[in-house]
Amino acid sequence: MKQPIYLDNNATTPLDPRVLEAMLPYFTEKFGNAASRNHAFGWVAEEGVDYAREQVAKLIGCTEKEVIFTSGATEADNLAIKGVFEMYKDKGNHIITAVTEHKAVLDTCKHLEKNGARVTYLGVKEDGLVDLAELEAAMTPETILVSIMYGNNEIGVIQPVKEISAIAHKYGALFMTDATQAVGKIPVDVNADGIDLMAFSAHKMYGPKGVGALYVRRKNPRVKVTSQMDGGGHERGMRSGTLNVPGIVGLGKACELCRLEMESETIRLSALRDKLESTLNKMEESYVNGNTQHRLPHVANISFKYVEGEGLMMAMSDLAVSSGSACTSASLEPSYVLKSLGLSDDLAHSSIRYGLGRFTTEEEIDQAIAVTQKAVNHLRELSPLWEMFKEGIDLSKIEWAEH
Amino acid sequence: MAYSEKVIDHYNNPRNVGTLNKDSKFVGTGLVGAPECGDVMRLQIEVSEDNVITDAKFKTFGCGSAIASSSLATEWLKGKTIDEALSIDNMDIVEELALPPVKIHCSVLAEDAIKSAINDYRVKNGLEAIVLEKSHH
């Protein structure tokens, strides 16, 4: 077994060798600029891009013309939100999003607030889902955009996008979703889900880094975004810049593989995840974070009370995982996503996120369980809080010296 | 972030983990930090009649650097007089463990824990608590 075991597939996924194979010719013999309209090098590159556009469109149920290639999901989020704000500013200036969004959405909204936008940041329920009644109550005639993510990167919960888009449309607003963690993992259909704009990225679905896409609806309604980069007017004028042909070909191939293998992968991954989660959840004082019914098949987020996440990760150096704890002088704040579920800071500091992927094996999961149990037990032996808990001391009654 | 070898060593083989009888008048206990900040240290010293620290124990909830800082502190405390112990500076810990700037607060917490344990011992034995400078994290 390769060490360390990679269980951080929400951060990024390895490139599937089949994707690499599809990409390679576009670095060398098929190196043309897809915008070169008058010779074979350009045509060959353009063909590669066109085919990738079809592969992407097929995965999300749209037409090829609705796919705008970008450098990744962050750029797509920026283009969608800033682009809609500028394009529809005569209609209104109000944007609704949620506190558990990725920084690419939250910081874009904060940026727009400085430019005259009014932004509502919806809280979430204890299970991480948006409250639909709260969303509806926040809608105003000035609301131009509702931006709610599809699946959460830290806890994996899936938002009720169909219901959210219906509310947005009822009040004449567009619905945008950051679907970086969802596309390729679960069935996403822009028409069935009522999505007007959708950002996603190749490197979360076994494609290359540095490429992603923004879906922009062309019919019912025809959505337009103001471009955020000036240049040659590529991608229907919405995103200038020479196309990253090998990357785009890789994104296309990655989408095709995800589409063909999604059904069996979902069954396999959720079985492995459930094994990991239910075994670890049997440990004393361990808590699963987020809704366990509506969520991505490959994510488990667990808090092990009375041990600190970063220290825990150090004891699990054989595992590549991620923690909601941030123990640096710059930021002692634990994960804002976990905090917004109402988790106390100490539980948020004690959390570990396991992100399974296409190449995760059962053997690795068994190993991950054993390593985690050993590490948690080791650190609890070292933990004064664990000792106090065992002695029956109520930790909330202690006056801690805040620092 | 990569940890120094010394941090890893203390983390994997922590010295003097454990609990002393906090009710004994020869034992001083310092409990510093807060769970919501992600680190809590409990450091205990046992002091002989002639003011020498004969034993030291710790337990820490926190990152690797916090655990290593408190483990190192217990090593240094053993055999020292109270006055010598009071002169341990957090920057000595930073230097010994090669802590990066973002982990300096772990060493500050260890220094606070030492002083807080000494004060607990002093107060128990009818001495005045030493006024501690408010440390900054």
Image (cartoon, coloured by chain):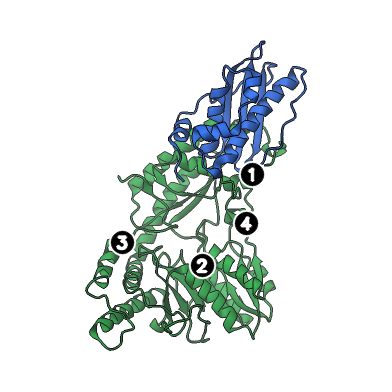
> A402 left or right of B102?
right
- Determine if marks 3 and 2 fall on one subunit: yes
The CA distance from mark 2 to mark 1 is 30 Å
Label 4 element class: helix
* Amino acid type, label 1: Glu
Q: Quadrant of the C terminus of chain A?
A: top right
Q: Which chain is green?
A: A
Q: Residue at x 45, y 71 (%)?
A: A188
- Determine if marks 2 and 1 fall on one subunit: no
Mark 1 — residue? B36
- Circle 4/circle 3 CB separation < 8 Å: no
* Amino acid type, label 3: Asp
Q: Is residue A193 visible?
A: no
Which is nearer the N-term, disc 4 or disc 3?
A: 3
Q: Which chain is blue?
A: B
The CA distance from mark 2 to mark 4 is 17 Å
The CA distance from mark 3 to mark 2 is 24 Å
Number of other residues with Cα within 10 Å of mark 2, as a class: few under 14, some 14 to 19, many 20 or more = many
Question: Up-down: is A98 above or below B50?
Answer: below
* Amino acid type, label 2: Tyr
The CA distance from mark 1 to mark 3 is 40 Å
Label 3 element class: loop
